[in-house]
Image (spheres, rainbow, N blue to C red):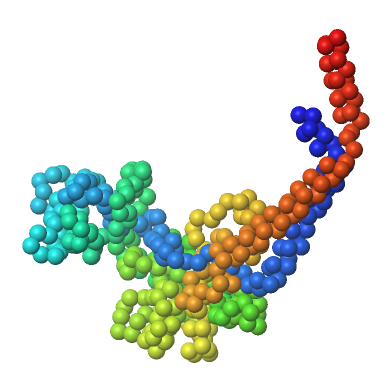
Amino acid sequence: MKIFRFVIESYVFKRIAVITALFLILIFWGFNKLFDSVWVSYSSVPLLYLNNVYKPPKNYDNLKRLNLALANDNKLAIESNKIFKVAGKQKNYDYFDTTDIQFPDQTNEVTNKIFLEFAGSLHLDSILLVTSKSREKIFFWRQIFHSTVIIEKLNNFSEDSDGFRVNENTLVEQPLLDNNDTLIYKVLNYFETNKEKLNLGDCGVNSATFRDICIKFSLPCRPVGLMGGDASQVGNFTDLGYPAHALCEVYSSKYKKWYVIDPTYGLRFRNTGSDDYLNAVEICNMIFFQREKFIAQDSVLSTKRTTLGRDYFKYYENIYFLPEKLERKSIVKFFQLLFNKFNINGYHYTNLLVPLNNGFYYVGAKSFIYLLLLIIYFNIALAVITRRLFSAKKPKHFINDREHFYTEKQKQQA
């Protein structure tokens, strides 16, 4: 305890403490500025799992989902978010059931065809589970080859079975679940009829106005940011990339998907010869591999017409989404003190993700240098403290304490 007091009260320790505080301020201010100026562009969360942005809105999420797990060596356990039973069984409808799995004997593989009856559904759903022999004895591979139902988890059931189930009370009315085109066309008609009164301007204003109208009609709609090129290219938004554009995606229960509506140019898009409208990621993938000649543009609004022609699709090189659930503001503010150029609330999709736009690369590189600087500094500080302490004079009270201790000890011996 006395050694600890001696260290704390030493002049060199106090000086090192002040220098450390100044050093930390220098790191979190000076180094931040320097690193971000070298990094150039803002970065976001790379969108690797499309369900993070393309799952249905909660009040439209009536899709059938399953969790599958092996119950034992020859049974498959099935948990569903809607009541069902395995076809051909006499068991009542429930959220859980099991079925036998066949394994190959004479052949190399067996396809298990599992048919499911969901309550209220006119058609059977199916899962094709393939079991195949391994080189090792009594060992088989199991693989889902095809399923008409969304497989949510494999070999893992939900922790909260009630939370996994569809709550009918949260859903919109059945006609809208089947087809909400009436809402979409009501919004388009309102926008078209009142466009002179809406104070339309640039693409950001137009998209925000369109989304506000969608909210009035209870139509799921969200803004989507498009950016062509990288931030190093000179343009109107040098920090974000150029060209830049804003549009919207609406959710269609008829097609069970989100798709693009561009309020500025009055367009939505589909594949030639198809009625299935495209979302931003599908357009991005289409123009990357096959170019835009395979995309048909539908004029749904008589707003401004694009003069860019094929260049319009340069926007789709980078797509930015804002998820429904945002991180808590206090956490985001603290995080951005250290990583100012990482948008923790934004997803970024592209076919050519450069490291400068990858938020994980940005955080990883910056964290490594933070840690390296701290390790170097504290090693230097520790060396200085140790060296000075060995050569420093002991504090007066520490010397007096030692003299008092030896005096008392001599008295006891006498």
- Tell me the residue at 43%/83% (across/down): 287
Q: Is residue 365 visible?
A: yes
Among all residues in the image, which is located at the extreme front? 414
Q: Is residue 321 visible?
A: no
Height in image: 403 above or below 155? Answer: above
Q: Position of residue 39 (x, y in %)?
A: 65, 71
Q: Nearer the viewer, residue 218 or 77?
A: 77
Q: Nearer the viewer, residue 251 or 287?
A: 287
- Which quarter of the figure is the N terminus placed in? top right
Q: Position of residue 125 (x, y in %)?
A: 19, 60
Q: Position of residue 371 (x, y in %)?
A: 66, 56
Height in image: 4 above or below 102? Answer: above
- Tell me the residue at 40%/68% (across/down): 258
Figure disc tally = 0
Q: Is residue 281 left or right of residue 201?
A: left
The quadrant where residue 131 appears: bottom left
The quadrant where residue 186 appears: bottom left
Q: Nearer the viewer, residue 326 or 26?
A: 26
Q: Is residue 189 left or right of residue 21?
A: left
Q: Is residue 218 left or right of residue 339?
A: left
- Tell me the residue at 20%/46% (across/down): 72
